[in-house]
Image (spheres, rainbow, N blue to C red):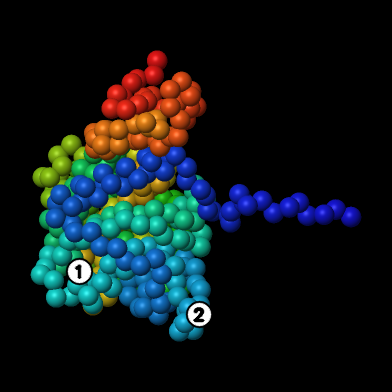
Amino acid sequence: MTENPPFSPALLPAGFVDLLTPDARTQAQGVAALMDVFTSHGYDPVRPPLMEFEDTYLAGAGAALAEQGFRVMDPDTRRMMVLRPDITPQVARMAGTRLSGVPRPLRVSYAGACVVVAPVAAEESGRQIMQAGIELIGPDSPEADAEVMSIGAEALSRLGVRGVSFDLTMPPFIPALLEEAGVPQAERPALLRALDRKDAAAVAEHGGALAATLIALLDASGAAEHAVARLMEITLPEQATAIVRRLVATVGALRERCPGLSLTVDPVEFRGWKYHTGVCVTLFAQGRSEELGRGGRYRCNDNEPACGLTFRPDVLCRLIPAAAPRPRVYLASDCDHAQAAELRARGHATIGGFLSGAQAVEEARRLGCGFVLSGADCVALS
């Protein structure tokens, strides 16, 4: 008979990890840099709670995320609560309630942890994820979409993320096209699977009278200028045409703000967009498969138009050099504490000590310090 091994206090649930230095330091400084860019453009920070009542969170944009939320019961009210899997629905709620009287356009930014039932991408394993982003609420225009995306590009540049590509898509486009073309509901699943796989042969098989149009849309994917030119050549019904025109206008507005940005368009992409209602964007870096962030147009809980962009700092910070630590100064027991405060103000980290003389020097080296402050003298260790 075998006994179970003793439970290790270091063991964590699947998908949850301890983030240690230097990774924790890099992420903290990265989030601070993102928020600094956001606030410099007038996006004021908000901090929604980690948990909400289930019926509140799922009443608006969050309804599409019902399967991704952990539930717990509030022991006080006996009502079910949900751990947020995404912050954007909370901003949508706030915009329609506590911030409803704030003048529009309303610009807000945020950063915080989210918890998802399953990893958000196939190549990831984390269930606790970080989010940092912005939401522009009120205006519904290509220029508003371009503002959000251009700020995202600036934030990535601030972090030093290179080889970034913005991939635009229109989640409502294909459903609207199939509806206007009268494609029977029973035939749509097979056709949508074919479009999702970018399988032109399967699209031809299942597309019926719409097959040629759908194949032309597949061919239109690629660099933004190529995609725009091809899309404008395709004859589409009224609602689908309006969606394409909005995409084309957004590309133009974004090009004015960011002429050198790598920009692609995938007109048939629709999966993974839960509550979005218009032009959307996914951010990638060259040579990496995971998303750096995503966002796009949606509706707040009171049906007010909005556009946002959410970054994944835990992913972003794997693409940049580790943040440098502060120079460490060991404070000998006889140190001048006013001088220690001055060193901290100048960017040093002081490590409180209880030794002096040669013992202080030995202890400073053991603790990874490069300096020792004894009295008012700060001496570099060789």
Locate residue 55: give its quadrant.
bottom left
Closer to viewer: mark 1 or mark 2:
2
Kindly identify the amino acid type of the residue bearing the numbered disc 1: Pro
Horizontal side of 233 relative to 267 (left or right) equals left
Which part of the image, by quadrant, shows the C terminus?
top left
Q: Residue at x 82, y 54 (%)?
A: 3
Question: Where does residue 195 sit, x and y in percent of width and height?
Answer: 40, 56
Q: Residue at x 38, y 41 (%)?
A: 25
Question: Where does residue 319 sit, x and y in percent of width and height?
Answer: 38, 37
Kindly identify the amino acid type of the residue bearing the numbered disc 2: Pro
Residue 105, above or below 1: below
Foreground residue among 129 and 233: 129
Q: Are marks 1 and 2 in contact (CB under 8 Å)?
A: no
Which part of the image, by quadrant, shows the N terminus?
bottom right
Q: Residue at x 10, y 70 (%)?
A: 103
- The secondary structure type at the circle numbered 2 is loop
- The secondary structure type at the circle numbered 1 is strand
- Callout count: 2
User: Gap between marks 1 and 2, in whole Å?
Assistant: 36 Å
User: Residue lying furthest right in this view?
Assistant: 1
Q: Going from the N terminus, do you reach mark 1 or mark 2 first? A: 2
Horizontal side of 350 relative to 249 (left or right) equals right
User: Residue lying furthest front in this view?
Assistant: 334
Residue at numbered disc 1: 305
Residue at numbered disc 2: 75
User: Do we see residue 240 in this rendering?
Assistant: no
Q: Residues within 10 Å of mark 1 (few under 14, many from 20)?
A: some
Q: Residue at x 49, y 84 (%)?
A: 78
Foreground residue among 34 and 371: 371
